[in-house]
Amino acid sequence: QSALTQPASVSGSPGQSITISCTGSSSDVDAYTSVSWYQQHPGKAPKLLISEVTNRPAGVPDRFSGSKSGRTASLTISGLQAEDEADYYCASYTTNRWLFGGGTNVTVL
Amino acid sequence: QVQLVESGGGVVQPGRSLRLSCAASGFSFRTYHMHWVRQAPGKGLEWVTFISYDGSEEYYADSVKGRFTVSRDNSKNTLFLQMNSLRAEDTAVYYCAKAYSTYFDYWGQGTLVTVSS
């Protein structure tokens, strides 16, 4: 099964809002409320940002938010900050396996 | 606090085997499912395998099915990944990740596996 589809890169200025899309299929993103998002800085391990489409773990700033409509999930970063420059990955459960998106590199201009 | 520490990576020739370990602490290891996820150099994340809390269920990505085996020792709070018939395309940083519901809530720092002659 193919990976989920994300844009390769997104950029924005400090203070702006950006949105990263994650497109799957009727068997994964659209079938389950199991989309999660991860942030990865260079040379570091991924870190959970959003679970089960919209839930933000303790310690994650509220400028990170998630949503889903049909086969496409989205991560929005409001009030972009320099430390948000990183790679972002979506993931979804499907039957007995997990899929990741190809990753989106976020650049803060 | 939750800690996951991978070990066992290194350079191995194609066709050979390697066993990775992940030592867990800071949570009740025996009650949580676990995953292995890998990342090839400069590439994205790829889910590799899942094992249930008691080892009774295992799932694998098609790319490793029949070659990799996941296991765990709950008495030693340790997760394992036995990798056989290694290929160049298995070169990656391998992360162990704690499962919570359908997502990965904690990750180790990873161990690098390089398959090269």
Image (cartoon, grey):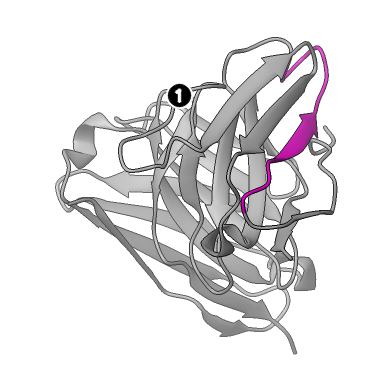
Residue A24, percent across and down?
81, 25
> In the drawing, does residue B114 fall left or right of residue A47?
right
Residue A96 in view, yes or no: no
Q: Quadrant of the N terminus of chain A?
A: top right
Residue B4, percent across and down?
31, 58
Q: Secondary structure at mark 1?
A: loop
Write the start and end of the magenta stretch as one range: A15-29
Q: What residue is at 59 percent from the left and 72 percent from the top?
A: A42
Q: Which residue is disc 1 drawn over?
A: A55
Q: Quadrant of residue A73?
A: top right
The secondary structure that most of the magenta stretch takes on is loop
Residue B59, percent across and down?
57, 33
What is the count of numbered marks? 1
Q: What residue is at 77 percent from the left and 33 percent from the top?
A: A22
> In the drawing, does residue B79 fall left or right of residue B36?
left
Tell me, yes or no, whether the highlighted magenta stretch contains residue A47: no
